[in-house]
Amino acid sequence: MKLSTATLLAAALFLAAAASGLSEQLFNGRDLTGWHIDVPAMDKDPAVPSPFIVRAGNLVSLAKPGGHIITDAIHENYRLIVEYRFAAKPGNCGVLVHASTPRALYDMFPKAIEAQLMHTNAGDFWCIAQDITVPDMEKRRGPKENWGVDGKKLRRIPNLTDGSEKPVGEWNTMVVECLADKVKVWVNGELVNYGYDCQATRGQIALQAEGSEVEFRKVELTPITTLTE
């Protein structure tokens, strides 16, 4: 039986993580130890419930009010494995890497590079107050004079594939590798984005509450010294 390229790549990523023996579960399956929540609406009214909870062993983003759950620790040179699914209606969410300054965009988003989870767009990059370069930049991002990292500029860099996501309700696996100024993203074993010359090389990791309810059953980090080819 001939295995698909996606299957072989997924196996290679799994074996690389297993071989290191240094994987850290950023979400422990019980509570939100190691994370803090940054939701502007909760500042204004302490009675507003958090959009981040633990339910049935999953970390759940309830989508509203908008905000982020952010690791207390700063990380660099790692492979991040995130297993997620839209619990009901598909929509928007994201994984942020190299996060730093809180509320740097729209008074809500921390300075970061986002690996998009939005349904049918998983793996897009969004530049949030910091930038990254990809091959075929003008073709993928649009006219160079409109590039930027604030709300008035072209911040989205579309992914390289279509159809990498599984049907709504099934679990997806996103792998993000960050090494020095490079970032690579896979969705279900398919390479969906690759960037370099990132303006940050370390930072916190964040998950969004934005748009739709999403369940996360794994958020695992492994130190790396090379990128997966």
Image (cartoon, rainbow, N blue to C red):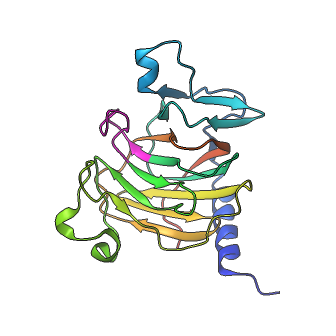
Residue lying at 29% horizontally and 55% vertically, measured from the top left = 131
Q: How many marks?
A: 0
Quick one: 49 or 217, which is closer to the camera? 49
Dominant secondary structure (helix, strand or loop) of the stretch shown in magenta:
loop
Quick one: 193 or 147, which is closer to the camera? 147
Residue lying at 36% horizontally and 38% vertically, measured from the top left = 110
Q: Residue furthest top?
A: 46
Residue 91: % across, % down: 57, 51
Q: Quadrant of the N terminus?
A: bottom right
Residue lying at 53% horizontally and 43% vertically, measured from the top left = 211
Quarter of the rendering containing residue 14: bottom right
Residue 26: % across, % down: 60, 38
Left or right, residue 27 beside residue 68: right
Q: Residue furthest left?
A: 145
Left or right, residue 199 beside residue 211: left
Residue 102 shown in magenta: yes
Left or right, residue 120 beside residue 99: right
Residue 108 shown in magenta: yes
Quick one: 96 or 145, which is closer to the camera? 145
Residue lying at 69% horizontally and 63% vertically, measured from the top left = 166
Magenta residues, start to end: 97-112
Residue 181: % across, % down: 34, 58
Residue 225: % across, % down: 48, 59
Quarter of the rendering containing residue 53: top right
Left or right, residue 178 beside residue 175: left
In the image, is residue 82 above or below residue 39?
A: below
